[in-house]
Amino acid sequence: MRVEPYEFGRAFVESESSPGDWYLVDLLERHRLGVCDCRDYEIRIQAAIDRGDETTKPWCKHIEAVRELIPDVDDVLFRMAAFEAKCERNPVRLGVRRG
């Protein structure tokens, strides 16, 4: 499965069943579990989330393909979330030096 990085936390993944079709995966969404715009994700995973049901798997094969490219993806995403939370708690104005 071909994966093309797009921007931080996002990548395009080529469809296995329809080469030439691409799906956008965003690992930063859904509390860092990721979302995908493929039909499998929309029908099976997102529909279960919308109903308030448990999902059988937390992600589709396209999300899994992107996650496999990043060593220790869960650690990276955890550290990003911690950094973002720290920034929200302690905003710093640009151009101001702390002594």
Image (cartoon, rainbow, N blue to C red):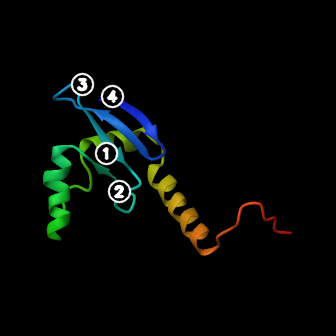
| Label 1, label 3: how far apart the Cα atoms are | 18 Å
In front: label 1 or label 3: 3
Mark 4–mark 3 Cα distance, whole angstroms, equals: 10 Å
Tell me which label, 4 or 3, sits earlier in the chain: 4
Mark 2 residue crowding within 10 angstroms, few (<14) / some (14–19) / many (20+): some
For marks 1 and 2, the one nearer the N-term is 2
Location of mark 2 (residue): 33
Q: Is residue 27 left or right of residue 47?
A: right
Looking at the rendered structure, the kind of residue marked 4 is Arg
- Residue 53, horizontal then vertical, whole percent: 15, 68
Give the crowd class for mark 3: few <14, some 14-19, many >=20 residues within 10 Å.
Answer: few
Q: Amino acid at mark 1?
A: Ile
Residue 15 visible at all: yes
> Closer to the N terminus: mark 3 or mark 2?
3
Kind of residue indicated by mark 2 = Leu
Residue corresponding to mark 4: 2
Disc 1 secondary structure class: helix
Q: CA distance from mark 4 to mark 2?
A: 20 Å
Q: Residue furthest bottom?
A: 89
Q: Which residue is under mark 1?
A: 63
Q: Is residue 54 visible?
A: no
Nearer the viewer's eye, disc 3 or disc 2? 3
- Tell me the SS state at disc 2: loop
Seen in the picture, residue 67 relative to 83 is either above or below; the reply is above
